[in-house]
Image: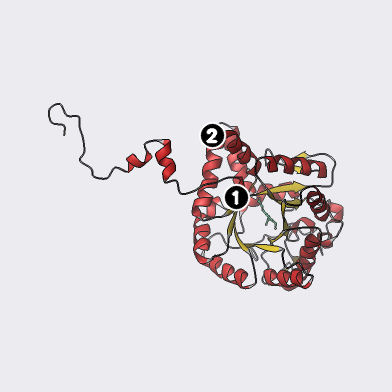
Amino acid sequence: MSDGDRPYALSLRSRPRRNRKNATIRGFHRETRVGPEHFIYPLFVHEGDADEPIASMPGCARLSLAGLLREVEAARAVGVNAVVLFPKVPDALKTADGRESYNPDGLIPRCLRALKERWPDLVTVTDVALDPYSSDGHDGLVAPDGRILNDETVEVLCKQALSQARAGADIISPSDMMDGRVGAIREALDDEGFTEVSILAYTAKYASAYYGPFRDALDSAPRGGDKKTYQMDPANAREAVREVMLDEDEGADMIMVKPAGPYLDVIRLVRETTALPVAAYQVSGEYAMLKAASARGWLDERSVVLESLTAIRRAGADVILTYFARQVGEWLAGAR
Ligand code: PBG
């Protein structure tokens, strides 16, 4: 009630809005920062001479080698200094045993050598899994009855990891979700003297529908069945803790949660479970949703992208794999 001339006023000791009243004061107590130093930039490469746009991922393309070098140059110019490479393998090279995955002259080793020759300090990350190379489109070897074979797959993954390390990968990133692969890859790397090559484990990787555009980009969707016998059930969080304990024990250097935005609770849980750096992958479907709504004018792209990445950092991610890496770097460079 106002009495007489006094305007209506509550008598409050605490008014949280005082700490939000201008940009400088808000800046004093901002808890979360996000910038290009936190990003790993995922890039698609193919054998062709021209870059091929990916319909469900506007702004992304399957890059030629020249296109890759151009893209990395532009990304580095705005402070993004880590990339992860994904190959679109021609159908003729896809086999049931996925042997192209460890071809020393395959697409990924060639790209790695070219990148490292031009920028020795660029941090190169490579994905270890068979799906881009497999005629079955699975991350592991498929038995005649349809089961995904674990231990036989791990043997192939070790060969793949070694071929990547020999070509200059700084960080090997197994995304296949086979049991025991981190330990086996660590041992294979160490046996060949690659003790300085890191392992960023896809530790809590869910069987998610958000990977759809990525599988379009690589034409890598499973030909039969789904990935639920190796990737995690989206309904589960405790299982992530168990995977963290195993990957730590097997020698992982960094732990990943994937997808990111819909799994912020898992990022937080993993953050509180491990002392290792935590990465989160803002996957192709998260990118596609934000791009599509922004293209229609339904969301403001810059604001919503920065908010989505801030939320992933706030949840506890040190590093974010994001297709927005270069774009955010450009936005923030312009803002400085
Ligand atoms: C393959 C792999 C996938 C992604 C990264 N590595 C797809 C899958 O598991 O089916 C998804 C990335 C994305 O959607 O952006 N092992």
- Position of the N terminus, as image quadrant, is top left
Amino acid tagged 1: His
Q: With respect to residue 288, does 169 lie above or below?
A: below
Q: Which mark is residue 5?
A: none
Q: In front: 146, or 17?
A: 17
Percent x, y of residue 71: 74, 41
Amino acid tagged 2: Asp
Q: Secondary structure at mark 1?
A: helix
* In this view, the mark in front (1 or 2): 1
Q: Which mark is residue 38?
A: 1
Q: Is residue 250 left or right of residue 274?
A: right
The quarter of the image that holds ligand 1 is: bottom right
Identify the image quadrant of residue 248.
bottom right
Answer yes or no: disc 1 within 8 Å of ligand 1: no
For label 1, the crowd category at 10 Å Cα-Cα, with few meaning under 14, some 14 to 19 and many 20 or more, is: many
Percent x, y of residue 62: 76, 44
Camera sees residue 40: yes
Identify the image quadrant of residue 190.
bottom right
Percent x, y of residue 167: 81, 58
Q: Is residue 309 left or right of residue 227?
A: left
Q: In front: 336, or 105?
A: 336
Q: With respect to residue 297, does 172 lie above or below?
A: below
Percent x, y of residue 113: 82, 53
Q: Which mark is residue 300?
A: 2
Camera sees residue 205: no
* Picture residue at 84% right of the left edge, 43% below the top: 48
Q: Secondary structure at mark 2?
A: loop
Q: With respect to residue 17, does 200 lie above or below?
A: below
